[in-house]
Amino acid sequence: MNHEPYESWLFTVESLTADQSQALKGHLETCEACQKLEAIWNEAETLLRNASPAYPTPGFTARWLIRLASRRSIEQQKKMRRLTWWFFAFAATSAMVFFLLSMMQVIPIFNSPVDFFIGGIYLLSSTVSMTNALQELVATLTRVIIQAIPPYWLAGLFSMAGLLCLLWIVLLRKLLLPRRILS
């Protein structure tokens, strides 16, 4: 037996015409399969209408916010790693280009590799002697300052420097660490 229009009419939301309604009633009186289908559909419809709405389990919002913060933190770490690598690549490329350009300027000055080697040794020795001279200057200035300034002023200066460093660290932490979402 053909049940096609009758099954569709059972499940339709729109109202049926008088002829369709009459034909459906006549078919339901003779067809057991459609009677069972109508009974099951009416029961399912009643269950759906009387069902209470589903609510999330307690703590859902807090768990969701924690998961969101975790994902954001992971994404921010990935972004920082990418930016760090890009910065490193840029710095390395810039240093290499600077080195090559410098070498292109320096190499024609020397007539032989021996001159280049001697120039490198001279540069190294002058750097070492300048470092030693700077070290002696700083040591001498430190001795003079320590003898000229009273100890309580030195203690005050060091404590102020320590407080300024601590303030700097706190401000950097506030600015650089991500904000936390509080619920």
Image (spheres, helix red, strand yellow):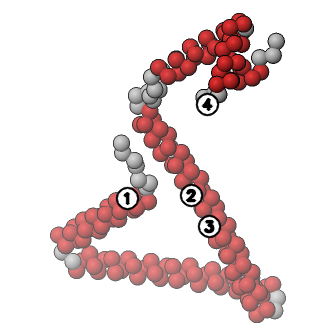
Instruction: Residue 97 in the image: state x and y as whole percent.
Output: 72, 78
- Mark 4 is on which residue type? Glu
Marks 3/4: CA distance?
65 Å
Asked if residue 13 can be seen in this view, the reply is: no
Q: Closer to us: mark 2 or mark 3? A: 2
Q: Nearer the viewer, residue 156 or 39?
A: 39
Q: Residues within 10 Å of mark 1 (few under 14, many from 20)?
A: few
Q: Residue at x 73, y 89 (%)?
A: 106
Q: Residues within 10 Å of mark 2 (few under 14, many from 20)?
A: few
> Are the residues flagged by discs 1 and 4 in contact, CB closer than 8 Å?
no
Q: Nearer the viewer, residue 147 or 91?
A: 91
Q: Closer to us: mark 3 or mark 4? A: 4
**Residue 155 image-quadrant placement:** bottom left
> Are the residues flagged by discs 3 and 1 in contact, CB closer than 8 Å?
no
Position of 37 compared to 71: left or right? right
Q: In the drawing, what numbered circle is on residue 14?
A: 4
Q: Residue at x 41, y 31 (%)?
A: 59
- Mark 3 is on which residue type? Phe
Q: Which residue is mark 2?
A: 80
Position of 130 compared to 94: left or right? left
Q: Earlier in the sequence, mark 2 or mark 1?
A: 2
- Mark 2 is on which residue type? Met
- Mark 1 is on which residue type? Lys
Marks 2/3: CA distance?
10 Å
The C terminus: image quadrant: top left
Q: Earlier in the sequence, mark 3 or mark 1?
A: 3
Circle 4 sits in a helix, a strand or a loop, which is it? loop
Q: Which residue is mark 3?
A: 87
Q: Earlier in the sequence, mark 3 or mark 4?
A: 4
Marks 2/1: CA distance?
17 Å
